[in-house]
Image (cartoon, rainbow, N blue to C red):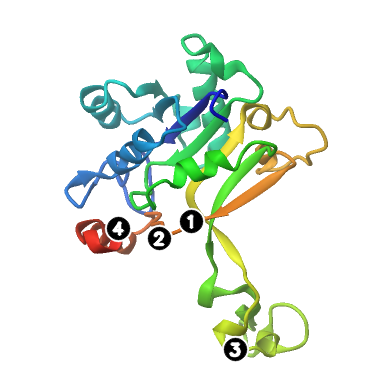
Amino acid sequence: MNDTPAMALILARAGSKGLPGKNIAPIAGTPCIAWTIEHALAAKRASLIAVSTDDRAILDLVRSRYPGVAPVVRPGDLASDSARVDDAARHAVQALGAEHPEFRRPDAAVAILYANVPVRPAGLLDAALAALPGADSVQTYQPAGKHHPWWTARLDPATGEVRPWEGDVLNHNIFRRQDLPPAFVPDGGALVVTRRALFLEVSGVAPGPHAFFGKVRRGVVSPGPVIDIDTRLDAIVADAMLRDTTVTA
């Protein structure tokens, strides 16, 4: 992987219905996106760090505080609520192609990082990049814990009757968390794809919103908490964790 170019691409659109301005809002005294930029800069395997955004304040922050980070101005049609992540990522990779032709290689790695994730375990991006050779994509995961799919139920909207989500037995007849089989959920910490996968050039992949993950998909388990800020409560939790160095160290 050392001779394969790897880009850390941070996506940070201005709009957010749940928590407006969350990508630039202060978390533990630092703009939220800065935590992600710092994580990317600490990665040993990323040869280029870039930020794609339509937010003028974020562009100013990147240009003034991080001169080594490449800013990409994202068009408005790629920054709406309905815009797709892969469309924004393809635009950024193409925009950077003239100055960084190494990222025209089909095997080049593009690590997509979200600006609203200020809490990640140290080294997470490097771990995801290290797992990519031989695959089309790598995504980071957390153990499902008490939100395990076997403990998911259906509630009748009229009567409130509880039924199993699947099968005939509620909770698969398991009532102790330690007896559940391992299950994992994507945590938003990092998503790494090859350029070939990102540009939908992998054969045999069914169309769909995750087609850019390619065919051979891998996962790595994050060795610590990842906080994806969607609500004010998420921001409060992230702020507390980042101020408590015994938690995030």
Nearer the viewer's eye, disc 3 or disc 4? 4
Q: Which residue is mark 3?
A: 160
Q: Verify CB contact (< 8 Å) between mark 3 and mark 4.
A: no
Residue 60, percent from left and from top: 24, 25
Q: Which residue is mark 1?
A: 222
Q: Verify CB contact (< 8 Å) between mark 1 and mark 4.
A: no
- Identify the secondary structure beneath mark 1: loop
Q: Which residue is mark 2?
A: 225
Q: Which mark is residue 60?
A: none
Disc 2/disc 1 C-alpha distance (Å): 7 Å
The amino acid sitting under disc 1 is: Ser
Sequence-wise, the earlier of marks 2 and 4 is 2
Q: Nearer the viewer, residue 143 or 234?
A: 143
The amino acid sitting under disc 4 is: Thr
Looking at the rendering, in which quadrant would you find the N terminus?
A: top right
Taking the view exactly as shown, the residue that stands out farthest to the right is: 204
Disc 2/disc 4 C-alpha distance (Å): 8 Å
Q: Nearer the viewer, residue 182 or 227?
A: 182
Crowdedness of circle 2 by 10 Å Cα count: few (<14), some, many (20+)?
some
Q: Quadrant of residue 246?
A: bottom left
Q: Is residue 127 above or below residue 165?
A: above
Sequence-wise, the earlier of marks 3 and 4 is 3
Residue pictured at 41% horizontal, 26% vertical = 50
Sequence-wise, the earlier of marks 1 and 3 is 3
Q: Verify CB contact (< 8 Å) between mark 2 and mark 4.
A: no
Residue 161, percent from left and from top: 64, 90
